[in-house]
Image (cartoon, rainbow, N blue to C red):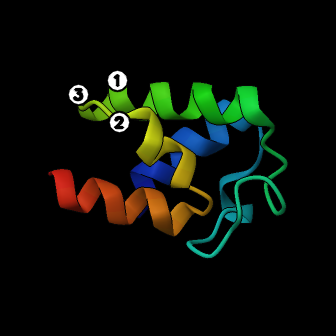
C-alpha cells in the first residue's frame, strides 16, 4: 500500500520516491500546497476507485494519514 501511495505522491508532486516516508508531512516535508493536496487526493481516489470526502481530506496531513484512511476503506 505504502509503495503505491508513494509512487502517486512522487508523480503528483514531481519529487523522488525515496524522499517520501510514512512520517512525511505533505506540506512541511514534501512541499505540497493546497492545490497539490487536492490533486493528490483526486489521484488517490482515481487509483483506488474510492471517494474521500472533503472533511476527511482536510484532516490528511502526512503520508501515514493517507495509508491509514485507505486501509479503513479497502
State the image coordinates of residue 8 (x, y, percent, origin top left).
52, 39
State the image coordinates of residue 1 (x, y, percent, origin top left).
33, 59
Of residues 4 and 61, the one nearer the viewer is: 61
State the image coordinates of residue 6 (x, y, percent, origin top left).
53, 53
Q: Which of marks 2 and 1 is nearer the N terminus?
A: 1
- 72 left or right, relative to 23: left
Q: Callout 2: few (<14), some (14-19), or many (20+) C-alpha neighbours within 10 Å?
A: some
Q: Callout 1: few (<14), some (14-19), or many (20+) C-alpha neighbours within 10 Å?
A: few
* Picture residue at 67% right of the left edge, 62% below the top: 20
Q: Residue furthest front?
A: 55
Query: Dot 2: what SS?
Result: loop
The answer to whether mark 1 and mark 3 are in CB contact below 8 A is yes
State the image coordinates of residue 28 (x, y, percent, origin top left).
84, 61
- Mark identifier at residue 52: 2
- Mark identifier at residue 49: 3
* Picture residue at 68% right of the left edge, 68% below the top: 24
Q: Callout 3: few (<14), some (14-19), or many (20+) C-alpha neighbours within 10 Å?
A: few
Question: Which residue, given by chain and number where applicable, does mark 1 sit on?
Answer: 46
Amino acid at each position: 500500500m505504502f509503495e503505491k501511495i508513494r509512487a502517486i505522491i512522487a508523480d503528483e508532486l514531481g519529487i523522488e520516491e525515496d524522499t517520501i516516508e510514512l512520517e512525511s508531512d505533505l506540506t512541511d516535508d514534501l512541499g505540497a500546497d493546497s492545490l497539490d493536496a487536492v490533486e493528490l487526493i483526486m489521484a488517490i481516489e482515481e487509483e483506488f476507485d474510492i471517494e474521500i470526502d472533503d472533511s476527511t481530506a482536510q484532516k490528511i496531513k502526512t503520508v501515514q494519514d493517507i495509508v491509514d484512511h485507505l486501509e479503513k476503506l479497502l
